[in-house]
Image (tube, rainbow, N blue to C red):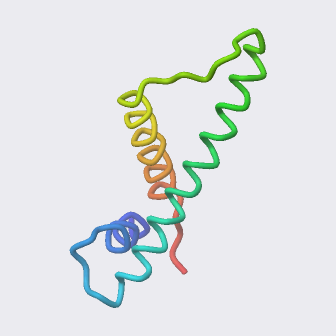
Amino acid sequence: MKHVKKFEAIYNEDEESNIKSETESLKARIKKAAWFAQETFWANIVEDFSEIKTGDFPPDATFEFNAACEKAVKIWVEGNITED
């Protein structure tokens, strides 16, 4: 599972500074992918429940949802990243 070790080396903040910019880039990409996925998710919810006119969602649930989406993307990337 070389790709997992590479992912962990890139993702973990405790690695050498030459990996730091790659780490920040990967983290930023994960956050961006999760954000766009959530936008698509909520657009589908709004479409399927068109009778609902508000978009209220509790702040604590928003935080948990954001964290879960980022974790899902991280797990997916970890399981699918390949060696260059």
**Above/below status of 80 relative to 71:** below
* Residue in front for this viewpoint, 37 or 76: 37
Q: Residue at x 35, y 81 (%)?
A: 20
Residue 25, x across and y down, in percent: 48, 74
Tell me: residue 9, above or below residue 75: below
Q: x, y (%) of residue 7? A: 40, 67
Residue 49, placed above or below residue 1: above
Split into 4 quadrants, where in the image is the C terminus? bottom right
Q: Is residue 48 left or right of residue 26?
A: right
The single residue placed furthest to the left in the displayed view is: 14
Left or right: residue 49 versus residue 22 is right
Residue visible at 37% across and 73% down in the picture: 10
User: Picture quarter containing residue 21?
Assistant: bottom left
Residue 8 image position (x, y, % from top left): 33, 66
Location of residue 78 (image quadrant):
bottom left
Q: Residue at x 39, y 73 (%)?
A: 6
Whether residue 30 sits left or right of residue 43 in the image: it is left
**In what quadrant of the picture does the N terminus appear?**
bottom left
